[in-house]
Amino acid sequence: MVADLIESLAKIIFIFTINLGFFAPVLGWVERKQSAVMQDRIGANRADIFGFTAIGLFHSLADAIKVLTKEDFIPAGANKFFHTIAPFISLVPAIAAFSVVPFGGKYTIFGHEVHLVIADLDVGILFVFALASLASFGVVLAGWASRSNWSLLGGLRAAAQMLSYEVAMGLTIIGVVMVFGSLKLTEIGAMQENFFRWGVFLQPVGFILFLTCAIAENKRVPFDIPEAESELVAGYFTEYSGLKFVMFWMAEFIEIVTISAIVTTLFFGAWHLPFVTDAMLLGFFQFAGPNGAAILAMLVNVATFFAKVVFFIWLQMSIRWTLPRFRYDQVMRLCWKMILPLSLVNILVTGLVLLLWTR
């Protein structure tokens, strides 16, 4: 019982540390630096400590210090309660969604079975979608509670966009659920031990559609019409400053990590190395003994999982700095007239193939 409690606390601390302590601050630097490289600029490189710039990494620290000293401004006539709570509603689901994402398999260490997921729910993927739908409330409340025309328009755009793409995104993963026969993310990940059983090979159309919907759900370029600075100043968070502004900023970046983790789990073999089974990995580290082999295999699997996550973070950043923003009507047309019908066709084709395959 004590060992289980310690394991649970360790996993929670690990996920919070890697998301809030590493990815959230570093992704701000990544966005600046990657855009600079793609645009043939130097990028963030001015902030320094005793003359050391650390390739611009101190800019994240400077940003943190700056926002801590900024005034928490609430417009006159705004609803103070909802204006204050909206950033929390956006941030918490982004972090909580990671609780059902497995970042490794099962390992027996000193007689104790370690399971690298915080909550192994039978309906793990549905839990992720439920939390994603909650995040839209934070955006809508932020736009409405600010008592600003720009914020209200941004909130309305976000509501239409997020609710539309939630429907399409839910349909895009039905094919994956049909192929693997489970809603548990741990089982879906475990069944991709064979490289040729990775979800991207079994559901290539589903992967493309899901990633598109996930980026739209996160309101990132080219789907950033709820916060289009050329039209709405900053959209739903125009009237936010200080820590509450940073919470929206962090929610967006953490959602990038969560999207990458879910794509990795559903379509790219989760924690598995290509062409390397769990038995092969344990056999390779057999020189360290049973417990040492399990620990080393666990470390390799965790590193593999987060290496894939980093790749998809890079991919999303590349898309963000490559494609121009869609118009509002184009975003809606893409969802209802292209992605939704294609996802339904994908379900139909998947069902027919499974029916013929099992005969």
Image (spheres, rainbow, N blue to C red):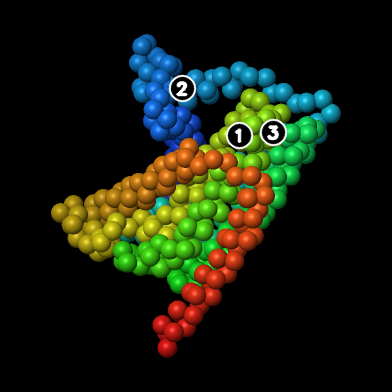
Q: In the current view of this chain or complex, which residue is farthest to the bottom?
A: 359
Q: Please identify, in this view, whether the residue under mark 2 or under mark 3 is nearer the observer.
A: 3
Instruction: Please say if 53 is above or below 97.
Output: above
- In what element is the residue under mark 3? helix
Instruction: Please say if 262 is above or below 188.
Output: above
Cα–Cα gap, marks 2 and 1: 18 Å
Residue 76 appears in the figure: yes
Residue 247 tag number: 1
Q: Residue at x 63, y 61 (%)?
A: 337
Q: Which residue is mark 3?
A: 232
Q: Amino acid at mark 2?
A: His
Cα–Cα gap, marks 3 and 1: 20 Å
Q: Quadrant of the C terminus?
A: bottom left
Comes first in the chain, label 2 or label 3: 2
Cα–Cα gap, marks 2 and 3: 27 Å
Q: Amino acid at mark 1?
A: Met
Quadrant of the rendered structure where residue 270 is?
bottom left
- Which residue is nearer to you in this view: 343 or 309? 343
Q: How many marks?
A: 3
Q: Which residue is mark 2?
A: 59
- Which residue is nearer to you in this view: 192 or 15? 192
Where residue 342 sits: x, y (%)?
A: 55, 65
Relative placement, left or right, of 163 versus 179 is right
Q: Residue at x 38, y 46 (%)?
A: 311
- In what element is the residue under mark 2? helix
Where residue 186 sits: x, y (%)?
A: 44, 62
Residue 271 tag number: none
Relative placement, left or right, of 290 versus 231 is left
